Each structure stands twice: as C-alpha cells, then as structure tokens.
Image (cartoon, rainbow, N blue to C red):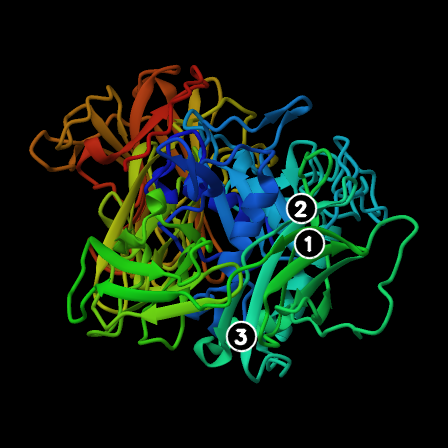
Amino acid sequence: MRTHSPNYNSPTDNPNFWQMYGVAKKLWPAYDFWSYEQSEDIAELQVCWKWGFIPYPCFGAYELPSDTWKVLLSLNTRDFFSNDPDSCDNANARTHYIGMVHPDTDTSTSDGWVLGTAYRNDNVAWIKFEPHSFVLSDAPALPDAGATLAHEMGHNLGRKHVDCGDPDGIDNNYPYPTDQIANVGQASYYGFDGRTQSVIAPNAAVDMMSYCRPYWTSDYTWRALNSRISSSSLIAAAPAISTLAAGDAVFVSGAVTPTASTGVLNYAWVYPTGSLSAGILRKWEGVAALPLEISAPMPQSTTAPSYTLQLRDAQNAILATYPVTLSETFDDPADPPVNNFSLTFVDPGNVARVELLADSTVIDSHAPGNQVPVVTLSEPHGGETFTDTLDLIWQGTDADEDDTLLYNVQYSPDDGATWRVVVNDFPAPDGEDVVTLTLNTRGLPGNGVNQGRLRVAASDGYNTGMATSNGFTIPDHAPEAYIIPPVSTPVGAPVLLRGGAMDAEDGALSGGALTWAVDGLSQGTGQEALAGGLGPGGHTATLTAQDSGGHTDAAQANFFVQFLRIPQGGMPQLDGFCDDAVYLDAPQLQLAPYGDGGQATVRLQRTADYLWACFSGLKPGAVSPGAFAGLRFDVDYSRDDLAQPTDYAFFVGEDGGYFTYAGNGAGGFAETGPGGLQAFVSAYTYTWSAELRIEASVLGGWDHVVGMNAGHYWVASQGNDYVWPYASGWNHPDTWATTMLGQGPTVFLPLILKQ
C-alpha cells in the first residue's frame, strides 16, 4: 500500500514477513495458508493540478487510519475484478486480499496506534508490518503483526470482538472470562504452541479477537472460524446464479457517512458478461442487486436513511433503482464512521446519470457523456518474452470532452480464461491520453508461449470501453522458499523445522517439493520436519524448494541448541535399571534411531563423587562381535580432530563386562583407559539396559566443560553404531557435545537469520 513511508518492492522484503505469516497460520484452524504477491501497489485517487490551474485525477499516498475506507474499497475492487489463484479455487478455499502497510507509517490516533482494519463478512483488510527492530522470542503469538493478521481475517469471517481492551463491536456470547481463553481447571481447554512445544494455560492468554495481550485462540473462536471456513468452501463450490447471465454487467462501489448524510460514488464499470471469467462472474453474482419497483415509494426510516443507487436516462426518467447494502467495518477509528458498499446489476442501457441517494436526497452522482471511451493498445505488440519488466502502453480517448477517464488493467496468464487486477481506478499520469505503465513481472504468474494477455478498460463514470493485447510470454518463476526460524531448543529435544515455499504458478509447495537439511545432513521433506540428535551450539537449517517446472530456491536460518548441563542429584542404586526416582528429572538424550524406528535413551546426573549414566531401550545385539554402550569424554575440552590420550571412553558390554579406553592421538581408541568405572546391565524380553558409574576424579572433577559422546556400538556388526549427537564421530572429539559438568552460568545467545 502506498503511504508516506518508503514502499517495499515485495511484501517479503520485510524481514519479519514469514514469522508474521507463521503466527497467523497457527492461530487459525486451517491446515495451511497460501500467500500470493501482487507487486503493483494500491494508492489513493486524488486531484492534482496541471500548470497550477487544470485539475486532473492522480494517485497519491494514503493517510492512515483516516483513509481506511478508501483502502478497503480499493482492495474490494481488486477482489471483484480478479480470479482467485487456481490453487485456492481448486481447494474451494476462501481468498483474502490484504493490504500491507510499511512499519514506519504513522497510523496513530489520539487513542493509540491502529495496526489493522477489516470488513466483517468480507475478504479484505489491511495490516501494518512488524517493525524491523523486532527480535524473535519464545512468545507463542509474536510478532504482533501475525496476531493482527489473524484478528483482522477473523473479522472477515464474521467474528466480533471479545471484550478485553475496550473494543467496539462486542461478541456478547463469549462463554469465558474475557481475559482468558477458557475457564481455569484441568478439565478445561489449553493452548499448545507447536513451535515452542509449550502449553498455554487458560488464564495465560486472551482470545485473539480481543485488544489485550498475549494472544492465543480460544476453542470458542477456533470452532467458529472452522465452521465458517467449511461453509465458505461449500459456498465457493456452488454454481453461480443467473442474475447477470444476459447482457452487460455493471459494477459500482462507493461509501457513505451515515451520521453526516454524505457519500462518495466511485466510477461504474460496464463489462460484457462474456468477458468475465466464471470465477469473477461468481463474485459479481454474490453482490448482484435486483431493481426496486419504480412506482413504489422509497422506504423512509426514522433512525437512519435508506441508501439506493438510481439510474436515469437523458430525459431524466428513472431507469432503475437498486438497494445499497453497507459494509460493517471493524477496528476503524474514523469519526464519524464511514461505510462502504459494492453492487452489481444488469445494464439497462441508455444510462445518462448515476445517483447515490440517502432516502430521496442525492448525495453524489456521475453524469458522463453518451459516448463510449476508446482504448488503443500499442505495446506489447505480441510475441515478446518478458523476464523482469514489461511496458504496457495505451491511449484512451473519449468523444465527450468533459469526461475524465479512469482505467482498470488486468492480466491473464492463460489466454483470457482467467484475469487478475494489476491496477484499478488508475488515472492517466499528468492527465495525458497516452499512458505508459511499467510492470514488474515478479507479481505476474508465468504463462505458456504467447498465452499472456493484458486488458485495459476505460470508464468515464459509466460507459466503458476496453482493449486486449496480443499474446506474449512470461517464463515460469522460481519458487520463494522461507523458514520460520526455530527457537532456542533444549539439548536432547528434537528441533521443529517449519517453512514452505510459494510459487507464482504452482501456489504453495508441500511434500517432496520441500527438502530439509541441517548442517548439510538430510532431515526429511514437507512443511514441517523434526531434526533430532543435534549437539549443543549453532546450527544451520536449509530448506530447498523445487516447483513443477524444476526451478529451485533455498532458504537458510541459523538456530541454537542449548548447552548440556549435568546437574547434581540424589544417589541412584547401581543395579542396571533406570527406574530410580532420581532419574526422573535428569537430562535425557535419545540415541540415533534403529532400523525399526526404536530409540535408546540415556539419562545423566551427578552425585558428589560420581557421574551416572543409565541407558534404557537398548536393542539386543549379535553375539559376535558383542554390542556395548557408554560414553566418551574429551576431558580437557581440546576439541581435537582425532582422539588424544586425554580423551577417555567408558563402556559396558551387553554381557555385563565393563572397560575403559583412551585415544592414541592418531585416530585409534584402544589404549588403556583411566579406570574409575563400575557398571551393571539388566535384560528384558526385547531390550536391555545399562547403568554406568564413573568416578569424578577421572573426569577432572566438577564445574568445568568437557566434550561428550554417547552411543550403542557394534549392535549387528562392527561399526553398526547408534550415537548422540547423531553427527558425532566415535574418534573425533571436535564433533562431541559441549557439556557442563555442573550447572554453570546461563548464557543467552542471539538468533541470527541468514538471508
């Protein structure tokens, strides 16, 4: 959206776009969000002056929040003149048109900041981007712009406000205290954030449809949105009614200020129904109006006027009168409030004047001449291929000298089968007849050879002429991959990787089109993947996306796994079992999965004189060469590439024998170890467990940092090992986990995103 702040070339230029997107996605009961970019902004239609005394229409910046009604009206026009993306139509999904406002834009009022506004029971809203200074945290519903996006889209689906933070438009049916997401109690509803793996208590958040913080979604709002999403899909799939099936169809929009009895009537647009795609025609049918009886008296109200649209011919006779239904706008601080409208109807012909009435009083009108504007396209010529930008050049003329023209420009990637708005209600720069519009192809889906078309429609206020270009080619675009950065993760816990990719042609990519890697090692496919067995420290996640055309893109994000700290606890019984109560709160690490998906676990803790390690869920190994489990330590934390004489191993075999080793400095690990080990094993039907007790003295005592590796070795054969960290090498201490033998200091490191 054009404001007085700098504008982005793309919404994703905001560094917090995908984090915002991820928050909105998890607050909604939808399995996915798909975003599509429109690179040409919307702007305010203003009056400019040529040579200081000749007025002409021009585009300028919106002032927010006072121009909210103009923004929503322009977005509404884009919606009504655009086919929704094919992926959305194919899924019978509801499509929202969201205006994005630069974070530096002043949207303040005397009561605070306005961060977004929406129509209720419609498809349009605007929200303000999160400031660049935002720092990602573990809070479930931050950045706040993501919660605002979910909130405003909630209004689109009919939700009113929950009464917290002094909003208007209250939902009086909210069943819980308005500063909670549910009643307190074990049998109540709790939130769960998959990103942070955290539970949200009923009284630890407020419903996202309120003005309070922190946000989450109550089951009440979740169910209501889910019901509307499902019913919207059924409506979207229904066949269009036939109100506009014959003749030319007319679209007109405007706004009224009920308390002031004033109004604004936008230009009307007359399109042959045959030029409207099935998807656009369905939208127009949704707001189609039938004429009132001309002979019937206008309904009069003692509390508020009734609004109508009236058409007259050149002799001032009434041709038709249509009822006007006003929108319900939420989060708009305008005073007095402004309500918009959009309606369509069949062109009765011979229209010379269009009037907007409050009861019987005309509050705005257009009286164009009777000649239809003529549009002549000179570029593109046809047959070109455009990869970055393309110039659209046309001339618009009208035989009625007093008429001023506005233009709608649409693009079709499929030879006219579907259309989407590029710009709407567009004035000719400087009031000239010849217009050059340079378009960024990034926002235009690729097309087959010479299947791209541009269409320019010119309106004088009612009469509409149009022209369509010859075919041209825009090559398919590469997808745009993104990662929602993982939070700082406790050691031993799997890291949830979340991301995706949007493609101008394919829509949202999923499944095998998305492949994950961490530090170069494969971690699975899809929009979410779990990366287990990561050692402490920094890691780099990479998501590679490939679309159906073979084009690829990759995104990276750096994240941090917290250091391993082995605390001091109670004394377990050395018996080979891991069911001692003192192990319940001990750090737990899972070894790499066996072939059947099972995993062994090791629990670690200290007493005054010993380090304890208890392995459970160990898979029985082959008799020869004999499996064993245990720990390796880089006692002096030298982080050498090859095991040194000060690197020790402490093992117990499946047969109960235990032993220690040391490195030799050349890659071997069979030198005599330091001793100081006792161990027991126990066997179950399908698994075995092992408990090791290591003297503190052979580890150099407590309260210092070591490197550590845990593993189950030689399970089926020599070298058939299952270790933690998964990427660690048995004789490479520089790959072992940084471990504090003690509590140690707490260090908070920043999360760095690599763009």
The residue that disc 2 covers is 217
Which x, y percent locates residue 94?
A: 56, 64
Picture layout, residue 118 above or below residue 587 = below
Closer to the chain start, of discs 2 and 3, is 2
Q: Nearer the viewer, residue 590 or 753?
A: 753
Q: Which residue is mark 1?
A: 222
Q: SS class of the residue under badge 2?
A: loop
Q: Quadrant of the C terminus?
A: top left
Q: Kindly identify the residue that appears in the image at 39 percent across and 16 percent down.
A: 702
Outermost front residue: 315
Mark 3 crowd level (few <14, some 14–19, many ≥20, 10 Å Cα): many
Asked where in the image residue 644 lies, by quadrant, the reply is top left
Residue 505 percent coordinates (x, y): 32, 65
Inspect the image, locate mark 1, and give the three-letter code of the amino acid beneath it.
Trp
Question: Residue at position x 65%, y 69% from top?
Answer: 315
Q: Report crowding for label 1: few under 14, some 14 to 19, many 20 or more residues within 10 A (C-alpha).
A: some
Residue drawn at x 21%, y 27% is 647
The type of residue carrying mark 2 is Thr
Residue contact between numbered discs 2 and 1, judged by CB atoms under 8 Å: yes
What is the number of the mark on residue 14? none
Q: Does 585 sit above or below residue 245?
A: above
Q: Which residue is mark 3?
A: 281
User: Could you tell me which secondary element the residue under label 1 belongs to?
Assistant: helix
Asked whether residue 29 is in view, the answer is no
Q: Between marks 3 and 1, how big is the CA–CA gap?
A: 31 Å
